[in-house]
Image (spheres, rainbow, N blue to C red):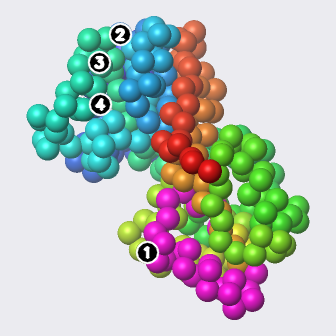
Amino acid sequence: MTVRDLVNKIIEKTGVTPLPEEKTCDHLKTGSWDMEVKGVVSTFMATVDVIRHAIDLGANFIITHEPTWFSGADNTEWLSDDPVYLEKKKLIEEHKIAIWRFHDHMHMDADDGIYRGFEEELDWGKYRVKCDDDLGWFGAVYELPETTLEELAHFFQKELDMKVVQLVGDQKMPVKRVSALVGGGSLGLGQENLPMRHMHAENIDVAICGDITEWTLSAYVRDAAQLGMKKGMLVLGHERSEEWGMKHLPAWLKSITEDLPVTFVDAEEPFTYIV
């Protein structure tokens, strides 16, 4: 099976009409379309360590959710003489690795592959509720067995193997209705007031966030808490909130890849924490 064959089958399985090249970031970043696939690695991001792991596995095709070349569009014009880019590119080319980004089509799947993996990892599918509000399309809302903000933070710390979970709000506040705004969704998808409007419209106790801007949602939640309102937020970061879609991707791919080896490689958090 070639890279082109596999990518076509993946997009077909999402049910999404293939997006024009100029309207998507789901491009082949390295390698060629006619390469024969020997093994596949799925990951949140094709970091140097992930690439090395793929090489050790004998895999020559990496499916990454996020950029390879340090910007949202993966533009490389500005990197032509950059030593980090040149060394990473050399590593990839020496081992003949194809890297394809699976982002837009993955999120546009009616079942959004990132949220699907998030729910499978946490066993939260049974808690998801349908929202009929005008903003019901934004994020994913869950009705949990009652807990506290502190207990929910420890839950994520344990389940997602996190050293640090940032939070805003009263740690002892009761929590039942939460919204997951994974990855960059918590920034508002170009509308920075969207997360706050969503919290209000859906009566959300706690927003579970990927990325944050400190003057928007965190400021809103902090003011709400200081006014005595039961509002909170947890910050998982972009990688920890989205990696699970890629972890559970191999099982989703099984009907396509059959006997072709497909392995998830955790890109891991980019930070080291000093306590």
Amino acid at pointer 2:
Glu
The residue under the point 29% across, 47% down is 71
**Residue 205 found in image quarter:** bottom right
The local crowd at label 2, few if under 14, some if 14 to 19, many if 20 or more residues have their Cα within 10 Å, is some
- Give the foreground label among 1 and 4: 1
Q: Looking at the image, can residue 133 be seen?
A: no
Q: Nearer the viewer, residue 88 or 18?
A: 88
The residue under the point 28% across, 26% down is 88
The residue under the point 19% across, 31% down is 83
Q: Label 2's element?
A: loop
Alpha-carbon span between mark 3 and mark 2: 19 Å
Q: Looking at the image, can residue 92 be seen?
A: yes
The local crowd at label 4, few if under 14, some if 14 to 19, many if 20 or more residues have their Cα within 10 Å, is some
Disc assigned to residue 255: none
Amino acid at pointer 1:
Glu
**Residue 224 found in image quarter:** bottom right
Q: Earlier in the sequence, mark 4 or mark 3?
A: 4
Amino acid at pointer 4:
Leu
Q: Is residue 210 magenta?
A: yes
Residue occupied by mark 1: 192
Image: magenta residue range: 207-230
Alpha-carbon span between mark 1 and mark 3: 38 Å
The residue under the point 19% across, 27% down is 86
Q: Is residue 173 above or below residue 237?
A: below
Residue occupied by mark 2: 36
